[in-house]
Image (cartoon, rainbow, N blue to C red):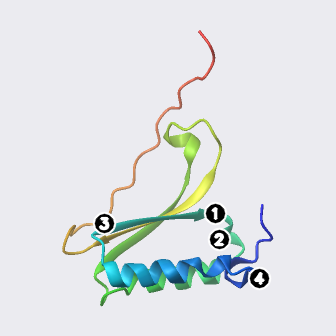
Amino acid sequence: MGLREGMADSQGRGTIIEHVIDALKVKKPPAFILENVRGLLTQHRNDFDRIILRLRTLHAKSYLVSWRVMNTEDHGIPQHRERVYIVGVRKDVQVSPYVWPKAINPKCLARS
C-alpha cells in the first residue's frame, strides 16, 4: 500500500491520469479501459469525480463513460481484489452504454 496521497502524491504518481487523458485526446481510440484502486472512491472522491467528468467531456462529449467497482474473485480469478474499472466507448462506435460482465461462480482450486 502506498501513502494514499492520490493526485497530490509527492513522487508525481497521482498525475499519471493527466498523461492518460492527454493520450486519449491525441489518439482518440474507439474504446478505453482504465483501472485503479477502490480507495479512489472513498479517500479521493472529488478527484475521482473530476476524472470521470474530464473523460466524459473528451472530444465534445464523444465518449460514453461508465465505471464499476469489481472484485476479481467474482470473475474467475482466485484473489479478492476490488478495483475501480472505467470504460469509455466512442459514440460513433457504439450507440448504447457498455454492458458490464456478470459475476461468475469461481472455480475451486483444490487438488483432485
Q: Amino acid at mark 2?
A: Leu
Is tag 3's residue or tag 1's residue first in the polypeptide sequence? 1
Q: Are marks 1 and 2 in contact (CB under 8 Å)?
A: yes
Is tag 4's residue or tag 1's residue first in the polypeptide sequence? 4
Q: Are marks 4 and 2 in contact (CB under 8 Å)?
A: no
Q: Residue at x 67, y 82 (%)?
A: 7
Q: CA distance from mark 1 to mark 2?
A: 6 Å
Q: CA distance from mark 3 to mark 4?
A: 36 Å
Q: Are marks 3 and 4 in contact (CB under 8 Å)?
A: no
Q: Are marks 3 and 1 in contact (CB under 8 Å)?
A: no
Q: Which residue is mark 1?
A: 37
In the rendered image, the residue lying farthest to the right is 3
**Closer-to-camera residue (56/59):** 59
Q: Amino acid at mark 4?
A: Ser
Q: Which residue is mark 3?
A: 97
Q: Which residue is mark 2?
A: 40
Residue 96: quarter of image: bottom left
- Disc 1 is placed on an element classified as strand
* Front: mark 4 or 2: 4
Packing grade of label 3 (10 A; few <14, some 14-19, many >=20) is: some
